[in-house]
Amino acid sequence: MRAARPLMLAAVLLAARAAWRLRKRRRTPAEQREADARARMAGRRATDYALENIREEERAHIARELHDDLGQLLATLRVDMSLLTQAMTATPVDEHTRELLAGMDQRLLSAITSLRRIASNLRPHALDEGGLYFALQSLRNDFEERHGIPCQLDASESALVLSDRYSTAIFRIVQESLTNIARHAAARHVRIRLRRHPGMLHITIEDDGRGIHQADMDKPASFGLLGMRERVWAIRGDIAITGSARGTTIDIHLPLPE
Ligand SMILES: Nc1ncnc2c1ncn2[C@@H]1O[C@H](COP(=O)(O)OP(=O)(O)O)[C@@H](O)[C@H]1O
Ligand SMILES: [Mg+2]
């Protein structure tokens, strides 16, 4: 009886394999085309995901270079400028030179501010420093400050402890949504809500602006929305974008690994 068990198991396995082969052979041409298309799509998603990872890594690298290299250089220049200004208080200089120096210092300060902004767009410093919740808070504060539109962030820190892959994707999606709101919506309020459910994260970004139209979403050069969709699909989530006279809503469900 005991010896028969492995034999039986082998027979079952062989039968299953034969059945599988038979099913495979019996695919109609239409089924085969569909299966091929599905395999191609899965392959494309995997490539997109790999490419996106490479892009994110490169962005992080450039951000570090900008910050460590050019940032340091500009900071040193500013120190030199203040030393020069101090030295000049001892010697009489004409008003024009004094104004020139003050202007140079001002432009240096703007260069440092721009560089910080560009570097933090490339790789959000806040993500490395304090995680996704902190990074979203900085994004929100920056948006309110720059555009004067109140933005509510409804989320909890503990719900947003996620892997770098998810954190970066979510950060980029919210970033693009806020850029779009500032550019296109003419909104008076914005609300970003993130809720964690078992195995799933639900994200809603709402504004009370003019409302997105179907034609807007079909624009051939609408890479912002396209990028957002690709990011969501790459982590097997779904995204719905709807617009009405009351504004635009972006609704995203992301399955989370347990
Ligand atoms: N929150 C929004 N409210 C109104 N219109 C929007 C909003 N977001 C996007 N749109 C519309 O959708 C279009 C496509 O957006 P996007 O793909 O990000 O491209 P871009 O911002 O470069 O124009 C925008 O040009 C705009 O007309
Ligand atoms: Mg855009």
Image (cartoon, rainbow, N blue to C red):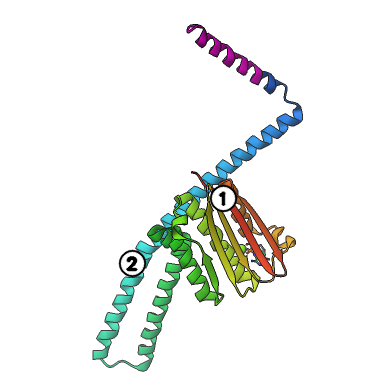
Q: Secondary structure at mark 2?
A: helix
User: Which residue of the protein is positioned furthest toward the front in this rendering?
Assistant: 1
Q: Which residues are magenta?
A: 1-20
Q: Residue at x 71, y 62 (%)?
A: 216
Amino acid type, callout 2: Gln
Q: Look at the numbered discs 1 and 2 and tell me whether their residues touch, using CB distance below 8 Å.
A: no
Magenta stretch: helix, strand or loop mostly: helix
Q: Where is residue 28 shown, x and y percent of the image? A: 75, 26
Which mark is drawn over residue 72? 2
On screen, residue 195 above or below 29: below
User: Hey, which quadrant is residue 27 in on the image?
Assistant: top right
Q: Is residue 172 left or right of residue 97?
A: right
CA neighbours of label 1 inside 10 A, class few (<14), some (14 to 19), many (20+)? many
On screen, residue 160 above or below 106: above
- Quadrant containing ligand 2 reads bottom right
CA neighbours of label 2 inside 10 A, class few (<14), some (14 to 19), many (20+)? few
Mark 1 / mark 2, whichever is N-terminal: 2
Q: Residue at x 64, y 16 (%)?
A: 18
Q: Is residue 149 left or right of residue 35?
A: left
In the image shown, does 89 or 64 lie closer to the viewer? 64
Instruction: Tell me the residue that label 1 is attached to.
Output: 254
Q: Measure how far apart labels 1 and 2 are at the Cα level.
A: 40 Å
User: Hey, which quadrant is residue 78 in on the image?
Assistant: bottom left
User: Which residue of the protein is positioned furthest toward the left in this rendering?
Assistant: 90
Q: Residue at x 60, y 41 (%)?
A: 44
Amino acid type, callout 1: Leu
Q: Where is residue 213 shown, x and y percent of the image? A: 73, 64
